[in-house]
Amino acid sequence: MPINKNVHEQMRNWELQQKQKSQKELREKYEYMNDKYQQMKNSYSGLRNVHKDDNEDAIFDKSSDLADDNSYMRYELNNTFKNKDDKKNK
């Protein structure tokens, strides 16, 4: 059975289309992950180090999206760091 030259051309085109499609998907995944990374980085940079003094102020930065959006997160951030300080002092 002779193989038509057109079949080879169609196969090659199909392979190129698949390659382009996978590259596009990878690029979209990269952009999505990069956006997520930037959001996390911005939220993290909004957090400050633990207070060295005995201030009762919140330890999170007021501009932090993470703390502003979630009152439970504010509670966790404050109590987690206070507990760690208590353990270090003992």
Image (cartoon, rainbow, N blue to C red):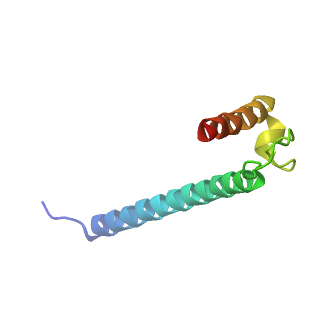
Quadrant for the N terminus in the image: bottom left
Task: Return the residue found at the far front.
Answer: 90
The residue that appears at 81% across and 37% down in the rendered structure is: 69
Task: Return the residue found at the far left.
Answer: 1
State whether residue 11 is above or below residue 72. Answer: below
Q: Is residue 27 left or right of residue 81?
A: left
- Residue 87 appears at what percent x and percent y? 60, 36
State whether residue 59 is above or below residue 39. Answer: above
The residue that appears at 48% across and 59% down in the rendered structure is: 21
Viewer-proximal residue, 22 or 48? 48
- Residue 74 appears at what percent x and percent y? 78, 35
The residue that appears at 66% across and 33% down in the rendered structure is: 83
Quadrant for the C terminus in the image: top right
- Total marks shown come to 0
Q: Picture quarter containing residue 76?
A: top right
Viewer-proximal residue, 34 or 66? 66
- Residue 71 appears at what percent x and percent y? 81, 31
State whether residue 33 is above or below residue 74. Answer: below
- Residue 30 appears at what percent x and percent y? 56, 59
The residue that appears at 60% across and 41% down in the rendered structure is: 88
Viewer-proximal residue, 80 or 16? 80
Q: Picture quarter containing residue 33?
A: bottom right
